[in-house]
Amino acid sequence: MRFLLIEHDSILASQLSELLIAQRYSVNLTEDSQTALQLLETYGYDLVILDTTRLMWDAESDLSWNKALEFCRNLRLQGHQMPIMILSETDVTADRIAALEAGADDFVTQPIDLHELLVRVRTLLRRGKETVEEVLTWENLRFNCSTGEVTYHTQILHLTPKEYRLLELFLRNPSKVFSRSALLDRIWNPGEFPSEQAVNTQIKGLRQKLKAVGIQSEVIESLYGLGYRLKPAPTRETEVFDAIAQIWQQFQPKLQEYFAVFEQALTHPSSEVQKQARMFAHQLVGSLGTFGFAEGSTIARQLEQGFRSEPLDHNLISERIEALKAVLKHKPESRKLSEQPAQQFPSGTRVLLIDDDMTLTAQMQVVLSANGIQVESASDSATARMMLAHNPPQLILLDLMLPDEDGFKLLEDLNAEFSSIPVLIMTSRDQLSDRVAVARLGGRAFLQKPVAPEQLFQAMMQVLEVQQHSDYQVLIVDDDPQICSIVRTLLEPWGVRVTALSDPRSFWAVLEHSAPDLLILDIEMPNFSGLELAQVVRNDMRWSGLPILFLSAHRDTETVRQVFTVGADDYVSKPIVDAELIARVLNRLERSPVRRRKV
């Protein structure tokens, strides 16, 4: 997410910027209103933080407050909807009212408590996400939030209250995966205790009503072991196909240029021409594979290796060139690019792609943008460094072969200067020494070109999840060490730190020391049962809001009733299903009230 900080005090500006950047937010800083307006017109911001006291709004300080209010009013009149936080030295009721009436969403008095500021920021961002959209759409399905009417073309859908809330939830969160337990929390009212089968029943009913009005495509998609999500509308897939087809057509002149260089490297060999031929072959490894030419990508890799050999094997290279031409007479399999990630990327995810292959860059921009990811690109290291200094992304995709600098050197520098930004390597190189070097220099993933979209999505999602959950702490209490080991093995790759306890007699001391964001309990244990430990936690004011998840082999109704009676938030039956446990734990952590109080 990107914030605009309007602050004249350099010390406070530095403190706030460092605080927000450490939380994985992108921050643009300015000290005057004119520059702020220009930035707002150029970039999309998720939050504006405005210091009304130290900002140089006007040469006359007594006009500073009025200018700030006018600035807020103008933003709202121009249609900007992002939250605005006012920082002020005074705590006067009249000022608070004036600020809110001018369009501000929050009013924070100085001196600022940085922890409180972060909580307020996250609260504003949550409100922003919940802003009601007038009409939600999926292809020709329209959900009018104001009137409550749901239509497909001209037909009205008559939905039950739970079906209505389900459909609204999916439409508001396209691509986000909801587990059954998450849907129970969101759709059912407090005091209702349905089983997860009730979710399946409601989903089935909603699907039947959608098909009854003529929707042939599947609207709600089932993901085995994870839950449900809104399936991308067919029109969106068509847009991706059309964009890729257009890129392929634009690529044809460049492709002929590549073949001309290949032929020149054979007939008039020189070190410079050979180097260019290697570079072009290297670029084709990635771009052809992404177009769906798997065989073409393999041939391009062979050409790259062939142009490295001394002396050149003219017969082999000629044969490979002709083979590549034959493969490329067919149409690209662009439908492979429409595959969607199994989970939704965090809102506002920005990626910097550092690669001199402009065709591959264009392909990646289409595929990633179709999934809500903002993509910026740099074809050389100098441009990349400048972009990183101005506006750091959440993730970097880096090719090791660049025209102006060794990719390993750039990776080393990135890890030193921007250690909080994960770097994923995408390259045609596949030597063990390359993989070891990347690991030593701090690379977070190594993807060999051609990279299939689902492979890229999986790597990006895992790295981002690790970043997002890197400060989460889970305490599991189970007298079976094997269960503790399994849970640790499942959660730690996602950045979650796990403390395991097999003796419940030490529970309270370990709880106080580890200060977890989530508690996982077994039911049956020696000395103290999990049910008793849950009651102890709920009876303590400090820990009463701690999310509790029970693990048990018992599935009978009475056991489930007891678990939720003592204050459990979720229940997972043994044997553990890996994907289900991960999804439920991460879902609880992200919504943890204890976590928000800690911050």
Image (cartoon, helix red, strand yellow):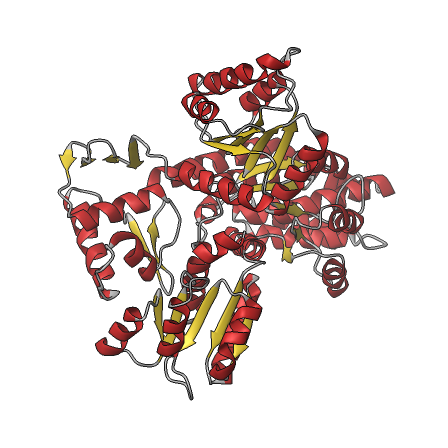
Measured from the top left, where is residue 376 in percent x and y?
61, 36
Q: Is residue 392 above or below residue 67?
A: below
Identify which residue, 48 or 9, lies in the foreground: 9
Using residue 239 as the reference point, say whether residue 474 is left or right of it: right
Quadrant in which residue 201 is drawn: bottom left
Q: Quadrant of the N terminus?
A: top right
Q: Is residue 157 above or below residue 512?
A: above
Give me the residue at 65% from left, 18% from top. Answer: 56
Residue 325: tell me if it is visible: no
Measured from the top left, where is residue 166 in percent x and y?
26, 49
Residue 74: tell me if it is visible: yes
Give me the residue at 47% from left, 44% from top. Answer: 334
Tally of numbered discs: 0
Measured from the top left, where is residue 147 in percent x and y?
19, 32
Quadrant in which residue 573 is drawn: bottom left
Identify which residue, 486 or 9, lies in the foreground: 9
Give me the residue at 21% from left, 62% from top. Answer: 198
Quadrant in which residue 87 is drawn: top right
Give me the residue at 44% from left, 31% from top. Answer: 105
